[in-house]
Image: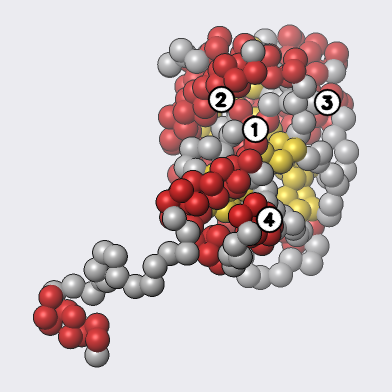
C-alpha cells in the first residue's frame, strides 16, 4: 500500500535521496575501505571486516562491507588465470604487441589455431578479486596457476576472418608426428590453402616447434606468424574456447564420460563459431591494445 500511495501521490516508486537509515561509515571510511580492498584484491568480505575492526576498533558486518565496496564500483569477480610469466616473457610479449599493434588488413589473413581441453567438471575454488571495470588484466587481479590433467576431451580448431576449420578430437598425448598426421595434413593445410595469403598462427608447444614440423611447414610453403612464449591469452581463439566452455558448463545435463562430452562438442562449435568468427578482429585489436597499455603502466610503476 505504501508503494501504491507513493505512486498515486508522487508518481514514483523509489525512495527520496537521504531517506532510510544512515550509513555506519562516512565517505572517508569508505575511501579507507576501498584502499584496504585494493591492497589485497583476493580478501573476502569477512577478512576485510576483521581487518576493519582491527584498524578502526569499529565492528562492521561482511554484508555492509560488500555493499560499500559495490557502491564504490568494486565488484567481486572471477580472477583471470594464466601461467606464470618471467621478466623475459613479459618483455617479449610487449615487443611482439608493439610490432603488430598497427596491423589492419593483415589480421584478415591470419589463421589462429590452438588445442583446448574441456573437462568433465571444473571447480574454481570460489576465489574472487575486487576490481573496477577494465581492470581484468591488472597483475594484482590475476592468479597464476599451472595447467593440470583432469578427465576430459582435447580438441583442435582454427579460426580466421569469417572462416573456421573443422573441430578435431585428439585422443591421448599429441606428439609432433601425430600433429602432422592427424591435424596438419588432413585439416590445417587444406584450410590454409583455401585462403589466399594465409598466415598460420600456433603457440610454441613442443609438438608445434619440433624440427620435423618445421620441415613440413617449409615443404608445404606455410607462412607462420611468430608468437611470443607463454601467451595463449593473446590469441582470439581463446575467447572461443572460453565461450564454448561456459555454454557447456551451463548445460544441466550430467556428463558421465569423455565420449559423451565429445558428443556435445561439435554442435556447440558450429553454433558458436558462425557468430563469433565474424567479429574477432575488433576484439583482437582491443586485446592487443590492452597488453601494450598494461605493460606500459607497469613500466612506469616499477622502472
Residue at 60% in and 29% down: 235
Query: Is residue 56 shown left or right of residue 215?
Result: left
Q: Which mark is residue 139?
A: 1
**N-terminal label among 2 and 1:** 1
Q: Which mark is residue 294?
A: 2
What is the CA distance from the residue labelled 2 to the residue labelled 1?
Answer: 9 Å
Q: Nearer the viewer, residue 31 or 146?
A: 31
What is the CA distance from the residue labelled 1 to the residue labelled 3?
Answer: 30 Å
**N-terminal label among 1 and 4:** 4
Foreground mark, 4 or 3?
4
Instruction: Check contact, mark 2 vs mark 1: CB within 8 A.
Output: yes
Q: Is residue 88 visible?
A: yes
Q: Which mark is residue 207?
A: 3
Is the residue 254 above or below the residue 226 in the image?
A: below
Query: Is residue 241 shown left or right of residue 176?
Result: left
Is the residue 51 above or below the residue 99 in the image?
A: below
Is the residue 202 above or below the residue 172 in the image?
A: above
Residue at 38% in and 72% down: 21
Instruction: Check contact, mark 1 vs mark 4: CB within 8 A.
Output: no
Residue at 13% in and 74% down: 11
Q: Is residue 166 visible?
A: no
- Secondary-structure class at tag 2: helix
Instruction: Check contact, mark 3 vs mark 2: CB within 8 A.
Output: no
Instruction: Check contact, mark 1 vs mark 3: CB within 8 A.
Output: no
Instruction: Check contact, mark 4 vs mark 2: CB within 8 A.
Output: no
Residue 162 % position (x, y): 46, 32
The residue that disc 4 covers is: 54
Amino acid at each position: 500500500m505504501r508503494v501504491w500511495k507513493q505512486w498515486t501521490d508522487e508518481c514514483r516508486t523509489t525512495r527520496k535521496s537521504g531517506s532510510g537509515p544512515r550509513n555506519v561509515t562516512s565517505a572517508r571510511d569508505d575511501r579507507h575501505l576501498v584502499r584496504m580492498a585494493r591492497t589485497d584484491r583476493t580478501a573476502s568480505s569477512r577478512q576485510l571486516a576483521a581487518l576493519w575492526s582491527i584498524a578502526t576498533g569499529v565492528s562492521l558486518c561482511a554484508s555492509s562491507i560488500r555493499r560499500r565496496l559495490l557502491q564504490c564500483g568494486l565488484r567481486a569477480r572471477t580472477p583471470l588465470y594464466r601461467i606464470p610469466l618471467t621478466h623475459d616473457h613479459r618483455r617479449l610479449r610487449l615487443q611482439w604487441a608493439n610490432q603488430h599493434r598497427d596491423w589492419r588488413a593483415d589480421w584478415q589473413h591470419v589463421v589462429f589455431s590452438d588445442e583446448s581441453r574441456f573437462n568433465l567438471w571444473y571447480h574454481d575454488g570460489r576465489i574472487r578479486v575486487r576490481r573496477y571495470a577494465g581492470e581484468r588484466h591488472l597483475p594484482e587481479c590475476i592468479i597464476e596457476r599451472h595447467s593440470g590433467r583432469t578427465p576430459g576431451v582435447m580438441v583442435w580448431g582454427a579460426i580466421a576472418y569469417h572462416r573456421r576449420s573443422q573441430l578435431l578430437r585428439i585422443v591421448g598425448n599429441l606428439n609432433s608426428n601425430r600433429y602432422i598426421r592427424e591435424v596438419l595434413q588432413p585439416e590445417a593445410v587444406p584450410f590454409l590453402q583455401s585462403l589466399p595469403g594465409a598466415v598460420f598462427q600456433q603457440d610454441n608447444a613442443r609438438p608445434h616447434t619440433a624440427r620435423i614440423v618445421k620441415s613440413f611447414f617449409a615443404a608445404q610453403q606455410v607462412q607462420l606468424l611468430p608468437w611470443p612464449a607463454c601467451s595463449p591469452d593473446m590469441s582470439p581463439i581463446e575467447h572461443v574456447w572460453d565461450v564454448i566452455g561456459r555454454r557447456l558448463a551451463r548445460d544441466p545435463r550430467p556428463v558421465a564420460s569423455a565420449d559423451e562430452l565429445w558428443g556435445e562438442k561439435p554442435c556447440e562449435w558450429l553454433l558458436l563459431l558462425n557468430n563469433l568468427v565474424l567479429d574477432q578482429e575488433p576484439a583482437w585489436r582491443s586485446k592487443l591494445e590492452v597488453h601494450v597499455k598494461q605493460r606500459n603502466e607497469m613500466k612506469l610503476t616499477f622502472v
